[in-house]
């Protein structure tokens, strides 16, 4: 499984009406990698994740996952194939308990015993959620809701996790906690495509990164190289 390409995006274009949100994107993720997409507001990071999980339809280009062309597959099929999307803004079900939100993440699965065991696994990974298993999700803190959103995405047993802005709007201490959980996740073998505005943090945990500017990839390389690249420093690392 050395250098097995899990996801490949080829010459992808996405338009919103007249707006060209993505222009000729090429990107590759090997199995087991953490790859980050960094860029300013509106650069097209979220759109890239949406195109992979087919929340938006590409104008042209191809998306290859595990050797299959998934460009024309629908979102629910992609979940079955092992792609989970943890969206920006968390979107947990506020009036449902933590436990029920997790159950919902397993909607494509049917083995109840395995689902229960996996919920226990999420509680080990996210001890704060275990303490609050019967609490309504809407009463959790922002950081806990982010943890729940990630745990819920993991309940579909993904091979590829698309993670959109997990640090958005959260205090530094909870951001550190979430990033250390992402590092633990990597150890379990999940491949991660991480979108972050906090380029510094993202590049610290990623293997490789891509820089998006106005819908196009302008720079790519090892995270360790990007973090010391003058252009990246100037534009994204403050
Ligand atoms: P952010 O971090 O703010 O989400 P981003 O890098 O993820 O930024 P996108 O959300 O992917 O950027 O947006 C890329 C471009 O597409 C922007 O110009 C944005 O205004 C535009 N856009 C995004 N969603 C829509 C939409 N539903 N309709 C029209 N234009 C959109």
Image: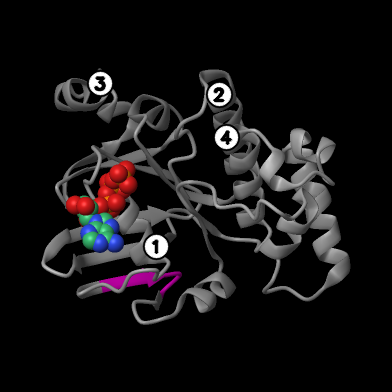
Label 3 and label 2: CA atoms lie apart by 21 Å
State the image quarter where residue 225 is shown: top left
Q: CA distance from mark 1 to mark 4?
A: 20 Å
Could you classify mark 4 by the number of other residues whose Cα lies within 10 Å: few (under 14), some (14-19), or many (20 or more)? some
Label 2: how many residues lie within 10 Å, few (<14), some (14-19) or many (20+)? some
Residue 177 in the image: x percent, y percent?
61, 26
Between the C-alphas of marks 2 and 1, the distance is 28 Å
- Residue in the foreground of this view, choosing between 56 and 78: 56
What residue sits 59% from the left and 29% below the top?
180
Q: Nearer the viewer, residue 212 or 96?
A: 96
- The residue beneath circle 3 is 228
Label pair 1/4, CB-CB below 8 angstroms: no
Identify the magenta region. 62-67
Instruction: From the viewer's perspective, tell me whether residue 38 is left or right of residue 163.
Output: left
CB under 8 Å between discs 3 and 2:
no
Q: Find out whether the residues at labels 3 and 4 contact each other: C-beta distance under 8 Å.
A: no
- Magenta stretch: residue 6 in it? no
In the image, is the residue at mark 4 within 8 Å of ligand 1 by its beta carbon? Answer: no
Q: On the image, numbered disc 2 is attached to which residue?
A: 176
């Amino acid at each position: 499984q050395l250098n097995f390409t899990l996801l490949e995006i080829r010459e992808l274009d996405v338009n919103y009406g007249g707006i060209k949100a993505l222009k000729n994107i090429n990107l590759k993720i090997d199995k087991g990698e953490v790859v980050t997409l960094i860029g300013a507001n509106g650069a097209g990071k979220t759109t890239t994740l949406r195109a992979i999980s087919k929340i938006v339809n590409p104008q042209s280009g191809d998306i290859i996952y595990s050797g299959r062309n998934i460009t024309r597959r629908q979102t629910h099929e992609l979940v079955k194939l092992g792609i989970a999307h943890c969206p920006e803004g968390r979107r947990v079900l506020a009036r449902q308990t933590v436990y029920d939100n997790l159950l919902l993440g397993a909607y494509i699965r049917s083995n109840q015993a395995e689902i229960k065991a996996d919920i226990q696994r999420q509680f080990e990974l996210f001890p704060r959620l275990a303490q609050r298993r019967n609490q309504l999700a809407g009463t959790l803190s922002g950081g806990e809701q982010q943890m729940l959103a990630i745990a819920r995405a993991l309940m579909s047993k993904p091979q590829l996790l698309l993670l959109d802005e997990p640090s958005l709007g959260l205090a530094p201490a909870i951001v550190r906690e979430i990033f250390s959980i992402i590092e633990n996740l990597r150890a379990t073998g999940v491949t991660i495509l991480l979108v972050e505005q906090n380029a510094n943090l993202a590049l610290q945990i990623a293997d490789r990164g891509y820089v998006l500017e106005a819908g196009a990839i302008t720079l790519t390389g090892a995270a360790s190289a990007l973090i010391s690249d003058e252009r990246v420093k100037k534009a994204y690392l403050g």
